[in-house]
Image: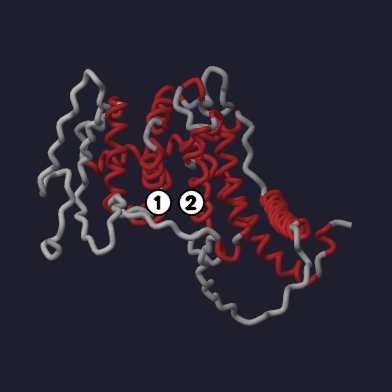
Amino acid sequence: MNRRDEMPVSRRREAAPAAAAFDELCVRHAAALIRQTYLLTGRPRLARRAVERGFRLAWQRWPEVAAAPDPAGWVRAAAYEYALTPWHRLCPGLRTARSPERLPGSASVQPAGRPLGPAGRALLEAVLALPAPYRRVLLLHDGVGLGLRATAAEVEASGAATAGRLAYARQTIAVRLPELGLGGQPPERRGDVVRGRLGELLTRVDALLAAEEVEPPGGAGIRADGERGARRTTLAALGLTGLFVLVTLLAMVVTPGHGARPRPWEGPRVAVPAEPRVAVSAEPPVMFSAEPRVPVLAEPGVMVSAEPRVAVPAVPHAPAGPDLPAPADVPADPPGSPGQPRLSPDLR
């Protein structure tokens, strides 16, 4: 049984008008959007991919798009944003084509309709040579036919900035294509000429897209792809969430000490400072003095000065012999000499 048959009847009745309106939007604007996006990128397959992505986003946000004043403008803005994404510069197959040999309609491609011609190819190369913001403003204003305010609102820029980009783009085309005769023309006349040449170029792009077998996407296929993409996104989010939960549980189980009973609360703990410990030695302390002490022996009742004594060696008496004379008496040291002890005044 098909998934669509499993849906309730009331839900299918509610989805039927939205699907019908979406399919009508695709039929009316898909081909024109591919032509416009091709002028932005120069690559037909990238143009189709960008338009398909724009319609897919529109289906995912269909209530918002259906209530918008210009649903086709909403899809166009989404397609232009994807076609001019800066990260496309990193992929060789998604870069903007600038050389003639990469453009459809060259020697390798022969369109079935009206050929592009040398003038058309030169104009296409001049448009692709512009920077992306200037190329987008030129296409919206002179190719699609939007006003200056509407163009500024779609590119999200001020009116002065949008006018400056438009003037620079026209001036660049006038310099690269002097055969158009835009050098001495006023801005209004220059805009009319560029607008007419871009409109003619858009009508001839259909033959190039047909030669490249680029067909506009269908509404049913876009809706199916959008629903599949939404389901894949939902499943991916659920899978990541389950993986995170599994890793968390595994970490809780493997962590040591997990599941142990917590200890009862014993109240706040107060830190008590420890008493200082005094080291007691078994040996008696030894007292040292900074000045050396000289032991002095004195008799009781005699005050001896602390001055050091000078020892005077005694002269030994030689024994008297028959041939040697007796030694003379050595006079005693007078009182107060260095060799005699000094007495205090009280004892003298």
> Image height check: is 67 above or below 132?
below
For the residue marked with disc 2, what is the amino acid? Answer: Ala
- Kindly check if marks 1 and 2 are in contact, taking CB atoms under 8 A apart as contact: no
Q: Residues within 10 Å of mark 1 (few under 14, many from 20)?
A: some
Mark positioned earlier in the residue sequence (1 or 2): 2
Q: Which residue is painted at 52% across and 45% down in the image?
A: 82
Q: CA distance from mark 1 to mark 2?
A: 8 Å
Query: Judging from the image, what secondary structure is the residue with disc 1 in?
Result: helix
Q: Which residue is painted at 30% across and 41% down in the image?
A: 191
Q: Which residue is painted at 59% across and 78% down in the image?
A: 269
Find residue 77 and report its horizontal and vertical position in percent.
48, 51
Label 1 sits on residue: 155
Label 2 sits on residue: 77
Q: Residue 238 falls in which quadrant of the image?
A: bottom right
Q: Nearer the viewer, residue 249 or 201?
A: 249
Query: Judging from the image, what secondary structure is the residue with disc 2 in?
Result: helix
For the residue marked with disc 1, what is the amino acid? Answer: Val
The answer, for residue 99, to whether it is visible in the render is: yes
In the shown orientation, is residue 162 left or right of residue 221?
left
Q: Nearer the viewer, residue 208 or 235?
A: 235
State the count of labels: 2
Find residue 49 and report its horizontal and vertical position in percent.
60, 41
Find residue 214 and report its horizontal and vertical position in percent.
62, 35
Which residue sits furthest right? 1
Q: Which residue is painted at 27% across and 45% down in the image?
A: 164
Quadrant showing the C terminus: bottom left
Which residue sits furthest bottom? 267
In the shown orientation, is residue 204 left or right of residue 326?
right
